[in-house]
Amino acid sequence: MGISIRTPLIHSLPLSQHSGCHVWLKMESSQPTGSFKLRSAENICRHYAERGATAFISSSGGNAGIAVAHCGRKLGLPVTVVVPESTSDRAKQLIEQEGAKLIVHGKVWSEANDYALSLATDDIICVHPFDHPLLWEGISTIVDEIISEGLTPDAVILSVGGGSMLSGIAQGLENHQLGHIPVYAVETQGTASLHASLNAGKLVRLDKVSGIATTLAASQVCENVFNVASRLDVRSMLVSDQEALKACRRFLDDHRVLTEPACGVSLSILYDHKIRFNAADNVLVIVCGGASVTLEGIAG
Ligand SMILES: *Cc1c(COP(=O)(O)O)cnc(C)c1O
């Protein structure tokens, strides 16, 4: 039985008319846990389960932790999720709902992650939230699915936190000889770790991350984004928190789907006309979703 599902690919009439091109939405918000993280978590958890893993650990208080918890439940293996004190009650609730053991440890993610790593053994696998080739391989199936439905995109818009989605989509595009198309990689101004690293030409750790898009708040992206940026046409874009929130609200009205600001950043590129596309262009937006969002959370 599958854990992650084949998600809908939708031609968005409202966004196409608004943008003057063909806008296609890959609805990762429809995954059982509400985000594409289920693809990456499934791929890595299955890999280790087949090789005798007895339990999983995650240090993510967000969609990655929820996804690992879900995979463990489906595979019949226990999961412990270590989260920092800053984790929202909603996220903690979703992790516990999946039946995982929740441990609150440390003020920031790096402290929770250090503790999570200390619990790992040969058989108890600590799943990183974004930095592992098996995660990226799982995400690359998004591109397989859109190609099998007959869509060849001229551009992709996606959001960037730690860079697993960018890595996975890049891998998928290259698998289908689409490594030449522009990939717009979007962050908020307060979480611009990819932007800083690409500008510096080396991995940069941000002193602090801030703002509404906590799902994008990795202070440093994975090193693989440099391999990706050197081979593909990656274009870093920044938007404000307000633009992200406004896009979430408009998307809710247009498509009746509630998404995190981490997803709104990508949608705002189109809603706020940040890029001009040609009328014939097929533009693919990865609607990455997000589970910890509520209606109050995006209210303006
Ligand atoms: C994880 C996540 C992101 C960012 O993905 P990275 O692979 O960390 O860059 C964006 N949106 C949602 C909903 C996510 O769960």
Image (cartoon, rainbow, N blue to C red):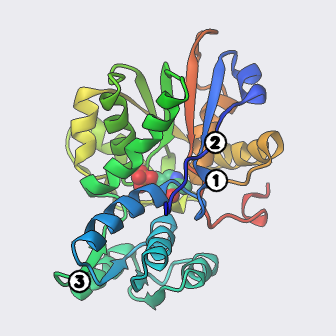
Residue 225 position in % (x across, y down)? 28, 42
Instruction: Give the CA separation, mark 3 to mark 1.
Output: 31 Å
Picture layout, residue 220 above or below residue 173: below
Q: Amino acid at mark 1?
A: Ser
Q: Quadrant of the C terminus?
A: bottom right
Picture layout, residue 74 above or below residue 247: below
Q: Are marks 2 and 1 in contact (CB under 8 Å)?
A: yes
Residue 184 appears left or right of 16 = left
Q: Amino acid at mark 3?
A: Ala
Q: Residue at x 42, y 29 (%)?
A: 183
Q: Are marks 3 and 1 in contact (CB under 8 Å)?
A: no
Instruction: Give the CA separation, mark 2 to mark 1.
Output: 8 Å
Which of discs 2 and 3 lies nearer the camera? The answer is 2
Number of numbered labels in the structure image: 3
Residue 268 position in % (x across, y down)? 64, 37
Q: Which mark is residue 8?
A: 2
Say which quarter of the image contains residue 46. Answer: bottom left
Instruction: Give the CA separation, mark 2 to mark 3.
Output: 36 Å
Query: Element type at marker 1?
Result: helix
Residue 184 appears left or right of 254 = left
Say which quarter of the image contains residue 89. Answer: bottom right
Q: Residue at x 47, y 41 (%)?
A: 142
Ligand 1 closer than 8 Å to label 3 CB: no
Residue 77 appears left or right of 294 = left
Q: Which mark is residue 40?
A: none
Residue 275 position in % (x across, y down)? 57, 22
Q: Amino acid at mark 2?
A: Pro
Residue that badge 3 annotates = 120
Q: Residue at x 72, y 28 (%)?
A: 15
Between discs 2 and 3, the one toward the N terminus:
2
Whether residue 139 is visible to the viewer of this picture, yes or no, is: yes
